[in-house]
């Protein structure tokens, strides 16, 4: 199966495809054992390269094919298991929180033998500056920091940005829909790794806890998630900075 044949089938029989699109903006369709992701031109190139990289370490499915014309197309095999927000998995939030915390620490502690060129901190600060210029403030995220003023949020980020470090390969979108486990909470793989790169571990830590709370409807298990990861390496000041960054990182 290749991109061309899948697109032809999709045009003729779209009812055969399951729309599994998330919040990233790109459209993802599932057909039998394949995922076909469709995005804006050049939008999926970073994810394609990330899949090639991380599949060597069994953290993701391998990319089968990528093409770019008027739009981007990315073909992968279907991931085994289920996303971490599946009812079966969130029915035991304590086990889920511990599993996700330990899994993230294992990923961050992995000694990748090949260099990865993407500077994640640099990329997020570019997005922050662009969203500030366009006044794109995420009001949902501002509620978490109790600050609703665009200039105040940006000023805090600008004043504190130098405390971010670049000592860890991070996922970049460590949210429950992107983490696949089997029914016994064993790791199957990551999705949506287009924002992976060398950056600050607190970015994944913040979004992991936020996503856990969002999908459970409360933050009751957030501390357990951090404890499973290892509180000894978690810096509250950097977590606070990431919370501000999240307001301008759409």
Image (cartoon, grey):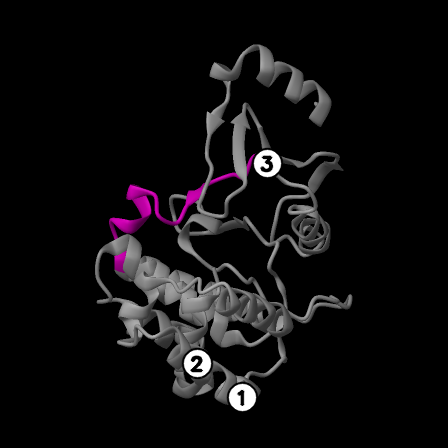
In the rendered image, residue 11, in percent from the top left (x then y), is placed at 59, 15
Q: Residue at x 54, y 49 (%)?
A: 189
- Labels 1 & 3 near each other (Cβ < 8 A): no
Q: Residue furthest top?
A: 12
Q: Residue at x 44, y 65 (%)?
A: 135
Quadrant into which the N terminus falls: top right
Q: Residue furthest right?
A: 114
Q: Secondary structure at mark 3?
A: strand
In the rendered image, residue 68, in percent from the top left (x then y), is placed at 74, 37
Q: Which one is earlier in the sequence, the residue at label 1 or at label 3?
A: 3
Q: Quadrant of residue 93?
A: bottom left
Q: Which residues are magenta?
A: 78-93
Q: Nearer the viewer, residue 4 or 95?
A: 4
- Labels 2 & 1 near each other (Cβ < 8 A): yes
Q: Which one is earlier in the sequence, the residue at label 2 or at label 3?
A: 3
Residue under pointer 2: 241
Is residue 83 in view?
yes
| Relative vertical location of residue 32 with respect to residue 169 in this rendering, above or below | above
In the rendered image, residue 82, in percent from the top left (x then y), is placed at 43, 41
Q: Quadrant of residue 236?
A: bottom left
Q: Residue at x 52, y 75 (%)?
A: 201
Q: Which one is earlier in the sequence, the residue at label 2 or at label 1?
A: 1
Is residue 234 in view?
no
Q: Is residue 89 left or right of residue 125?
A: left
Residue under pointer 1: 163
Q: Is residue 224 left or right of residue 249?
A: left
Residue 37's mark? 3
| Relative vertical location of residue 67 with respect to residue 138 in this rendering, above or below | above
Q: Quadrant of residue 125?
A: bottom right
Alpha-carbon distance for marks 2 and 3?
Answer: 32 Å
């Amino acid at each position: 199966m290749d991109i061309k044949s899948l697109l032809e089938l999709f045009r003729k029989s779209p009812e055969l495809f399951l729309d599994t699109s998330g919040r990233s903006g790109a459209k993802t369709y599932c057909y039998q054992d394949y995922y076909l992701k469709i995005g804006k031109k050049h939008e999926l190139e970073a994810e394609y390269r990330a899949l090639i990289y991380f599949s060597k370490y069994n953290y993701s499915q391998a990319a089968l094919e990528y093409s770019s014309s008027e739009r981007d197309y990315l073909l992968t095999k279907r991931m085994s298991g289920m996303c971490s927000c599946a009812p079966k998995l969130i029915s035991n939030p304590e086990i889920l929180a511990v599993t996700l915390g330990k899994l993230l620490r294992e990923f961050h502690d992995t000694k990748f033998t090949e260099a990865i060129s993407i500077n994640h901190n640099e990329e997020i600060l570019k997005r922050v500056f662009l969203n500030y210029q366009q006044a794109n403030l995420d009001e949902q995220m501002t509620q978490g920091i109790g600050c609703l003023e665009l200039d105040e949020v940006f000023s805090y980020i600008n004043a504190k940005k130098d405390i971010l470090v670049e000592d860890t390969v991070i996922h970049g979108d460590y949210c429950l829909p992107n983490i696949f486990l089997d029914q016994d909470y064993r790791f199957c793989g990551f999705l949506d790794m287009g924002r992976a790169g060398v950056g600050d571990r607190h970015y994944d830590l913040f979004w992991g806890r936020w996503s856990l709370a969002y999908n459970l409807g409360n933050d009751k298990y957030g501390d357990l998630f951090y404890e499973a990861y290892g509180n000894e390496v978690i810096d509250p000041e950097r977590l606070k900075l990431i919370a501000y960054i999240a307001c301008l990182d759409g």
